[in-house]
Image: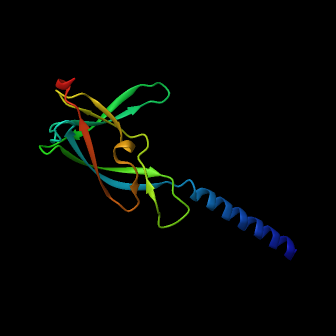
Amino acid sequence: MKRAVSSISLIVLALYLLVNCTLIAFVPLLHHVKLDFTVLDENSGEPVRAVELAWLWTNPSTGFQWTERIGVTDENGQLGIEITVQEQPLWCYPPIGSFGFHNHTLQLSKVGYEKRIIALADACGRVPYGRTTDSVKLTMTSAKLQ
C-alpha cells in the first residue's frame, strides 16, 4: 500500500511540475515602452512638423487595411507615445536580451510629402529588456522633388 501511494504521489508531482512548466512557457511578458518619434525631411535633415502618424493594421485573412491615429508631430517634428508590447518569455528571470516590435506598421502622412509606410521593427530594431524609452528617427521625402 505504501508503495502504491508513493508511486501515485510521484506521478501527481510529476504531472504538477509538467503542467506548471508548460504553462510558464505560454505566459506572455508585457513591456511598457515610451517611443519618441522624430520625423525629418530626407533631403534637408530639418524636422517636419504636423506629420500625422497612424498605426496601419491589416486583416490577414481578407487583406483589408485600416489606420488608427496616433497623433501629430509638434514644431520640432517630435511625437511621444507609450505602448505595451507582448512577447513570450525566456526561461530565465530577470529577462535578458531584447524584444522586438512584430506586426506594428506606421503610416506617415503630410500634405506636400509622399505617404510613407514603415515597419516599426525596421525603424527601431530590437529594444533591450529594461529600457523603457526608445528614440525612433523617421524620414519623409518631399513630393515636390519627385
Question: Whole-percent x and y of residue 136?
Answer: 28, 48
Number of numbered callouts drawn: 0
Tell which of 46 and 16 is nearer to you: 46
Question: Whole-percent x and y of residue 20?
Answer: 62, 61
Which residue appears farthest toward the bottom when viewing the image? Answer: 2
Tell which of 70 and 43 is nearer to you: 43
Q: How is the image coloured?
A: rainbow
Tell which of 84 and 114 is nearer to you: 114
Horizontal side, residue 90 vs residue 112: left or right: right
- Residue under the image location 41 percent in, 60 percent down: 129
- Residue under the image location 77 percent in, 65 percent down: 11
Question: Whole-percent x and y of residue 2?
Answer: 85, 76
Which residue appears farthest toward the left when viewing the image? Answer: 75
State which quarter of the image contains the C terminus.
Answer: top left
Tell which of 77 and 42 is nearer to you: 42
For residue 53, which quarter of the picture?
top left
Q: Is residue 131 above or below residue 1?
A: above
Which residue appears farthest toward the right when viewing the image? Answer: 1
State which quarter of the image contains the N terminus.
Answer: bottom right
- Residue under the image location 38 percent in, 27 percent down: 65
Q: Is residue 128 above or below residue 68?
A: below
For residue 123, which quarter of the picture?
top left
Horizontal side, residue 107 vs residue 10: left or right: left
Q: Is residue 12 above or below residue 105?
A: below
